[in-house]
Image (tube, rainbow, N blue to C red):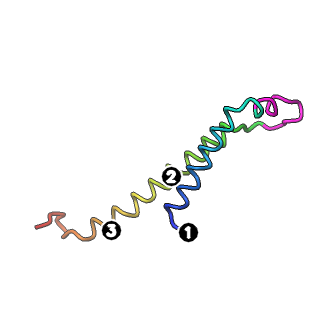
Amino acid sequence: MSVEQIKLIIAGTEETLRLLLKQPEYHELANSDHFVSELGLADAIQALSEVHQAIERSECDLVSPVVSSHLPPNGISY
């Protein structure tokens, strides 16, 4: 599986949870006495967003050294 596929799955899941969060049926469940959780759907959405951002940052870190390694030691390309 590629990094792009992983990012697409995470982003798709995040959007699906955002849609679910807007549904009155979800709020009925979340407000019931049987729904015992300190974490909510908004927390899951935030966590996925942070994971997606971390992957993007790590991609930048992985790409930057490769690009700069093609430059001469003084960093100037002729």
Q: Which mark is residue 54?
A: 2
Q: Residue at x 84, y 36 (%)?
A: 36
Number of other residues with Cα within 10 Å of mark 3, as a class: few under 14, some 14 to 19, many 20 or more = few
Q: Residue 71 or 7: which is nearer the viewer?
A: 7
Q: Residue at x 55, y 46 (%)?
A: 50
Residue 73 vs 37, above or below: the answer is below
- Residue 8: which quarter of the image? bottom right
- Residue 67: which quarter of the image? bottom left
Q: Which mark is residue 66?
A: 3
Number of other residues with Cα within 10 Å of mark 1, as a class: few under 14, some 14 to 19, many 20 or more = few
Q: Image check: 13 left or right of 72?
A: right
Residue 54 location (% of width, % of height): 50, 52
* Circle nearer the N terminus (2, 3): 2
Mark 3 belongs to which amino acid? Val
Q: Quadrant of the N terminus?
A: bottom right
The main secondary structure of the magenta stretch is loop
* Circle nearer the N terminus (1, 3): 1
Callout 2: helix, strand or loop?
A: helix
Residue 72 lies within the magenta run? no
Mark 1 belongs to which amino acid? Met
Query: What residue would you read off at disc 1?
Result: 1
Mark 2 belongs to which amino acid? Ala
Q: Image check: 36 left or right of 41?
A: right
Residue 49 vs 22, above or below: the answer is below
Residue 34 vs 63, above or below: the answer is above
Magenta stretch: give its range: 27-37
Q: Residue 7 or 77: which is nearer the viewer?
A: 7
How far apart marks 1 and 3 lie (CA) works out to: 22 Å
How far apart marks 2 and 3 lie (CA) works out to: 19 Å
